[in-house]
């Protein structure tokens, strides 16, 4: 199917390779060698720098003592880029597991960019869409102007938004810009794609963060992600707030980041997420009211 000679991988004595179900961006495999097991991510027909963003994200989290898979190697073979990581045997989430996860995420968010800037060293590349992570002093500029506005434009180009949807987004945009200006958040180290599918629990129940697309941004971005697709158990949020309490008004602002998640999925997957996008935009409008835009 793909022109990739697995024997050229920097692994000795490869015995078996199995495909693993994953996301819609990369191909994933488990690789059994004589004395170890590895996790292989593959992106066909790309250069070796395709995984540089994830590689930098893993290194950033490792440097901050956040548990992530160990990096083994990365490169390009037969016109396919690959990233080789340690294989984490998936265990179970025990009663304490999500409390541990809440502590890990809270401590991750306590890492504030030393220059008080939002962004990251690499731009976001989701396979079908790219966002700049250019350093800026404004979270509103990075999140709304560099991400949300581009998403809206690309969704419209795919005819998944109507003119009336664009007009509604313009109202939501004004709300987000004004709300985030008053909020004045700090640039925390974020995972960037924090949902249940990117959390592994080891056999002892300890959590591992996987597939990071890090940036320094408003920590409510990560929390919104956890609430959008499949809400984490209550223990996670309680432990997080015990360690690093969320700011006043977060309940309203969380909807901005849920909207981002739903728009990403609308763009990438299609109309199944249209109703969620529209419902979330109306939630934001109802939470703030038309007077907030005018005031």
Image (cartoon, rainbow, N blue to C red):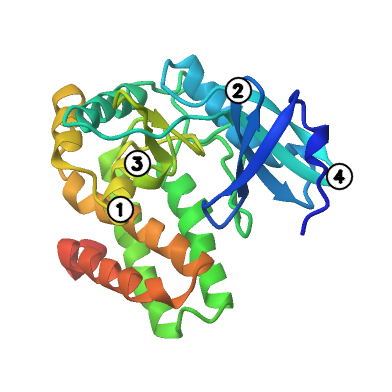
Q: Residue at 35% of width from left, 30% of height from top?
A: 186
- Distance of label 1 from label 3 (alpha carbons): 20 Å
Which mark's residue is nearer the viewer, 1 or 3?
3
Quadrant (top left/top right/bottom left/bottom right) for the N terminus: bottom right
Q: Is residue 271 above or below residue 20?
A: below
- Distance of label 4 from label 2 (alpha carbons): 24 Å
Mark number, residue 222: 3
Which mark's residue is nearer the viewer, 4 or 3?
4
Answer few, some or many: residues within 10 Å of disc 2's Cα (few below 14, many 20 plus, some between 14 and 19): few
Q: Seen in the image, is 41 located left or right of residue 76? A: left
Answer few, some or many: residues within 10 Å of disc 1's Cα (few below 14, many 20 plus, some between 14 and 19): some
Q: Residue at 70% of width from left, 33% of height from top?
A: 15
Percent from the top left, x then y, of residue 250?
20, 44
Quadrant (top left/top right/bottom left/bottom right) for the C terminus: bottom left
Earlier residue among tags 4 and 2: 2
Percent from the top left, x then y, of residue 138?
44, 40
Task: Give the residue number, with chain letter if any, for mark 1.
Answer: 178
Tell me the element at label 4. Answer: loop
Which mark's residue is nearer the viewer, 1 or 2?
2
4 and 2 marks in contact (CB < 8 Å): no
Answer few, some or many: residues within 10 Å of disc 3's Cα (few below 14, many 20 plus, some between 14 and 19): many
Task: Give the residue number, with chain letter if any, for mark 2.
Answer: 36
Q: Is residue 172 above or below residue 93?
A: below
Task: Give the residue number, with chain letter if any, for mark 4.
Answer: 78
């Amino acid at each position: 199917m793909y022109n990739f000679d697995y024997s050229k991988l920097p692994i000795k004595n490869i015995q078996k390779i199995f495909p693993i179900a994953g996301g819609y961006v990369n191909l994933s495999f488990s690789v059994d060698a004589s004395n170890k097991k590895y996790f292989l991510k593959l992106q066909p027909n790309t250069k070796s720098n395709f995984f540089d963003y994830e590689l930098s994200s893993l290194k950033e989290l490792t440097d901050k003592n956040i548990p992530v898979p160990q990096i083994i190697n990365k490169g390009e073979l037969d016109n396919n880029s690959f990233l080789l990581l340690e294989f984490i045997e998936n265990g179970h989430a025990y009663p304490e597991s999500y409390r541990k996860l809440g502590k890990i995420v809270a401590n991750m968010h306590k890492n504030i960019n030393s220059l008080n800037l939002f962004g990251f060293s690499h731009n976001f590349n989701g396979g079908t869409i790219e966002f700049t992570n250019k350093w800026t002093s404004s979270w509103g500029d990075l999140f709304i102007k560099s991400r949300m506005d581009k998403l809206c434009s690309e969704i419209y180009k795919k005819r998944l938004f109507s003119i009336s949807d664009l007009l509604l987004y313009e109202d939501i945009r004004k709300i987000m810009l004004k709300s985030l200006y008053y909020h004045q958040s700090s640039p925390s180290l974020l995972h960037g794609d924090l949902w249940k599918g990117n959390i592994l629990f080891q056999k002892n129940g300890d959590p591992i963060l996987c597939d990071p697309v890090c940036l320094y941004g408003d920590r409510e971005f990560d929390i919104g992600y956890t609430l959008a697709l499949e809400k984490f158990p209550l223990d996670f949020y309680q432990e997080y707030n015990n360690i690093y309490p969320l700011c006043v008004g977060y309940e309203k602002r969380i909807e901005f980041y849920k909207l981002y998640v739903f728009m990403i999925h609308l763009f990438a997957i299609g109309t199944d997420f249209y109703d969620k996008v529209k419902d979330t935009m109306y939630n934001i409008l109802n939470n703030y009211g038309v007077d907030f835009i005018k005031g």
